[in-house]
Image (spheres, grey):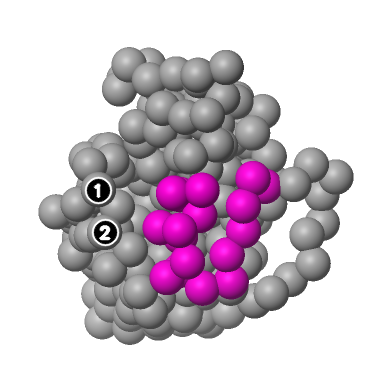
Amino acid sequence: MIKCITFDLDDTLWAVNPVIIAANKTLYQWLSENAELFVKCYKLRDFEVLKQQALQQSPDIGHSVTLIRLKQLEIGLLEAGYPQDQAVALSQQAFEVFIEARNQVELFEHARGVLEKLRQSGYLIGALSNGNADVNRVGLGDLFDFALNADGVGKEKPHPLMFEQMLHRNQLRPEQVIHIGDNPHHDILGAKHVGLWTIWVNLTEAVWPEAETADRDVTCLSNIPDMVAEIASISGHRATL
């Protein structure tokens, strides 16, 4: 019955906060060298203020971390005194610097091995992310058959659209897919409400905060293949009833 395993990326296969902190520092350094007026007006900590300004001005981009980042940079550059055309051009250049650094991730222990094992078992492997990490740029492109994110879909999890597009594009039924992720609301409840099986990645051993529970949970990524096998056994049994 189980044909496909989908993974969230940030905080499921790697810790995202250290990556964003480092990427923001790289971005600010580039701006200090290429947009002097910006750094005269803003400190590194002001990226968050600019993000909130971007969301206030353009609430329709709230699903897209890429569009938010571009708008954030454009606002800051305009307010620093750059003309519109230059602000747009600089924001695009700056974003490329940021996104390169944003994809310099350090995989959690066992992450690659688990993906390799599941792929060798014959499962279709996909990524479903609200972020803008690229499985190819992080070095996992050889292990994923497809990747969807909120930028491309137009909605972020837990909205059902990303899960539904995944099912449609791969001609799958919900009961044929296990979604694996760290976020109880975005990943687990979002996937369950579409009918997918779920595995909660709980590396911090947190207390489950929702009423509905995941089908399985793990506190170490190395346990994922066993949990997949358990779900596959259950789903196969149900299919024969």
- What is the distance, in whole Å, between disc 1 and disc 2 at their CAs? 6 Å
Instruction: Indicate the position of residue 236 as horizontal and vertical percent values.
Output: 47, 29
**Which stretch is magenta?**
214-230
Amino acid carrying label 1: it is: Ser
| Disc 1 element | loop
Residue drawn at point x = 64 percent, y = 76 percent: 204
Horizontally, is 80 left or right of 122 in the view?
right
The residue to which callout 1 is attached is 121
- Residue drawn at point x = 50 percent, y = 54 percent: 227
Magenta-span inclusion, residue 220? yes
Residue at the left extreme of this rendering: 142
Q: Which residue is mark 2?
A: 117
Q: Position of residue 23 (x, y in %)?
A: 37, 75
Q: Are marks 1 and 2 in contact (CB under 8 Å)?
A: yes
In the rendered structure, which amino acid carries the disc numbered 2? Answer: Lys
Nearest the eye: 206 or 230? 230
Residue 227 has which mark?
Answer: none
Is 143 situated left or right of 216 in this image?
left
Helix, strand or loop for disc 2: helix
**Residue at 28% across / 67% down in the picture?**
112
Tell me which corner region of the image, top left, top right, bottom left or bottom right, holds residue 133.
bottom left
